Image (cartoon, rainbow, N blue to C red):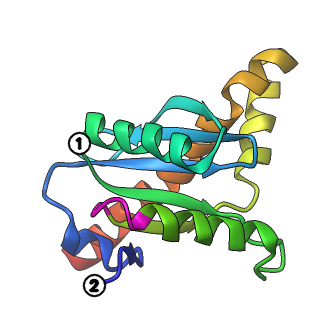
Amino acid sequence: MSNVLTIEELPERLPPRARLIGIDLGTKTIGVAVSDLERSIATPVETIRREKFSIDVKRLLELVKLQQAAAMVIGLPLNMDGSEGPRVQATKAFVRNCASLTSVPFVYWDERLSTAAVTRSLIEQDASRAKRAEVVDRMAAAYILQGVLDRLGFLSRARG
């Protein structure tokens, strides 16, 4: 059984009340967010400064365990035309390597414009450039995760 699920496969693999972890994988940082147990609200949690894979993944999996997350949602940085570029390949390689270290499944989510939307929101809130730099990655992770939570809610209503 693959450790990467589609959004449609995810609900059948989740217990009734369990958190999801959202991940915005950047080249310098990894933004992390977590959902509530009912999977309705995403909250930014932490920004991991990238060092090397083993250190980065160790901290990420610590957060997964701490939050008792049932799955990880990772933003897939597709090009604007929907094609896959080098960043998508890097993200898939990260997931492949990470998946061998955990039984917690992954779900990819199209993250196009997530960082831009979060940055725009922070600018509207008059956040300083330094403050934006500090929080943008974990807020982008929450934005990605919220997209999945909203989709899961829609799928559940469509079924029920």
**Quadrant (top left, top right, bottom left, bottom right) of the N terminus:** bottom left
* Residue 22 point in image, percent of width and height: 48, 49
Residue 13 higher or lower than 132, as above or below: below
Predominant secondary structure in magenta? loop
Q: Residue drawn at (23%, 78%), measured in percent from left and top?
A: 159
Q: Residue drawn at (83%, 79%), measured in percent from left and top?
A: 81
Residue 152 visible in the picture? yes
Q: Is residue 109 left or right of residue 116?
A: left
* Residue 9 point in image, percent of width and height: 31, 79
Look at the numbered discs 2 and 1 and tell me whether their residues touch, using CB distance below 8 Å.
Answer: no
- Quadrant position of residue 51: top right
Query: Element at badge 2?
Result: loop
Badge nearest the viewer, 2 or 1: 2
Residue 41 visible in the picture? no
Q: Is residue 116 left or right of residue 118?
A: right
Question: How many numbered marks, from 0 up?
Answer: 2
Q: Residue drawn at (80%, 46%), measured in percent from left and top?
A: 116
Q: Is residue 29 left or right of residue 108?
A: right
Question: In the rendered structure, which segment of residues is drawn in magenta?
Answer: 99-104
Residue 130 higher or lower than 91, as above or below: above
First along the sequence among labels 2 and 1: 2
Q: Is residue 30 left or right of residue 95?
A: right
Disc assigned to residue 68: 1
Nearer to me, 21 or 154: 21
- Quadrant position of residue 2: bottom left
Identity, as a three-letter code, of the amino acid under mark 1? Gln
Residue 139 higher or lower than 89, as above or below: above
Q: Which residue is mark 2?
A: 1
